[in-house]
Image (tube, helix red, strand yellow):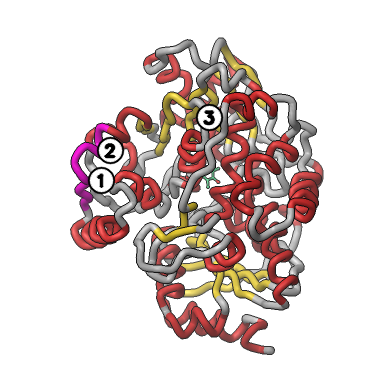
Amino acid sequence: MKFISTRGKSPALGFEDTLLSGLAPDGGLYLPDVWPLYSESQLLDWQHLGYADLAKVVLEPFIKDDVGSDVFSGLVDSAYRGFDHPAIAPLKQCDHDLWLMELYHGPTLAFKDYALQLVGRLFEHVLNKRGERITIVGATSGDTGSAAIEGVRGSDRADIFILFPKGRVSEVQRRQMTTIGNENVHCLAIDGTFDDCQDLVKAMFGDEAARKELKLSAVNSINWARIMAQIVYYFWAGLQLGSPQRVVNFTVPTGNFGNVFAGYAARKMGLPIDWLGVGTNRNDILFRFFENADMSMAPVEASLAPSMDIQVSSNFERLLFDLCQGDGHEVERIINEFRMSGTMDLPSGAQEEVGRLFTGFRYQDEQILSEMSAVLKSSSEILDPHTAIAFAQARIQGQERDHCNAPTVALATAHPAKFPTAVQQATGLYPSLPSRLSDLLERPERQTLLPNDYQAVKSHIMENARIILD
Ligand SMILES: *Cc1c(COP(=O)(O)O)cnc(C)c1O
């Protein structure tokens, strides 16, 4: 299998090169040239598999030309071995046809571990095989940073620099990054928003000289391998709940559109999904787009669900590629126009197409808090603020949009203890961290403060990357 850029101007790559390069040289994102499509009988055969074994079969077509199946099997087993629940991604029934999938049983308590534990191991495997080193640079609105760091900490082959918006990630999120002692880990607190951090990273990838010298690599959800790994839990939930005979729906707290795109990918690969909920907080560009065809930028505002405080969702470009029937020039034209004018005009018919499959949803901070408090009373569940948005969408729209008695699965993307202040505000309870993280607030921190300035960030990385020092 080959992977092609959404902008159509970069050469197609195999899996290993796609993994290492992240963003395509033409600025696009990689997608498989042909999607695998699983039959009903294949899916039936997989109903009894555990999470790791399911990952092996679902992902095989993507990796098999480059990574042998024994090696891959070993990497998958080791990636999920450290998770603290035997089901890896347990499903909980909260009401008739209303389910919660807990995606916070990995090392950093957010769903990003499900991808990054595997992706970190894939990096290490490929770099060892090639005898190469890389520099990973990424932006985080909170959870990506720690999950990426956990995925590669201690690597001899990769240095990791994570940019985050100073003061806009929770203390737990920050400490999960800044208290990691490994020498290859660098946390950069930027005076700006998440979008600023993302723009700095994009500028770095657009800087041909820096890109080459540092052998830059990305672990943001622009990296195809992350989307790939996330496809697994959609199949997992579907098969647990009776797919392929039964249709299933998902609601996804959405920021960069990576997670919900993985659901869209699972549907392309044969999982019978009727609709996908795209939940937003007050940063509601995606909500406005799916509801009123209004894709216009507004300033980013801090909310109680900071991992969704995003206006420009990078992975939307992957959906746009399909909406443009795979025409990379058209994708590039639309994205450039959006960057300049702040609004997006889609090809005709595209809006109706997305409207059938995706449903937007928006919750303001007060609604998030009241949902958290109501769910504690009705189901004895403590939700984190991101999950509360998905839960509300599943509860409300699961009935409105359900044509076929299908279960709706709300994705629980973070453990409540990652956002203790919001949880306490909503419920009066202070959620405690799992015991393995109980001393997090006492561990020493290590971070560098930098202005929202490309040259300053670049010099810092150049001065500290081992690949340059070598
Ligand atoms: C990253 C994150 C999101 C957003 O996911 P995307 O893939 O960027 O859409 C939502 N909730 C939590 C808790 C996250 O960490």
Secondary-structure class at tag 2:
helix
Which image quadrant: the N terminus? bottom right
User: Can the viewer see residue 437 in this picture?
Assistant: no
- Residue shown at the point (18%, 58%) measured from the top left: 341
Q: Examine the rendered structure and indicate whether residue 266 appears above or below residue 79.
A: above
- Residue shown at the point (71%, 39%) measured from the top left: 105
- Residue shown at the point (63%, 49%) measured from the top left: 115
| Circle number at residue 178 | none
- At label 3, the amino acid type is Leu
Between 231 and 88, the one nearer to me in the picture = 231
Q: Report if the CB atoms under discs 2 and 1 are less than 8 Å apart.
A: yes
Across and down, in percent, residue 4 comes to 44, 59
Occupied quadrant, residue 104: top right
Magenta stretch bounds: 343-352
Q: What residue is disc 2 on? A: 288
Secondary-structure class at tag 1:
loop
| Circle number at residue 295 | 1
Secondary-structure class at tag 3:
loop
Q: What residue is disc 3 on? A: 271
- At label 2, the amino acid type is Arg
Q: Is residue 166 left or right of residue 126?
A: left
Callout 2: CB less than 8 Å from ligand 1: no
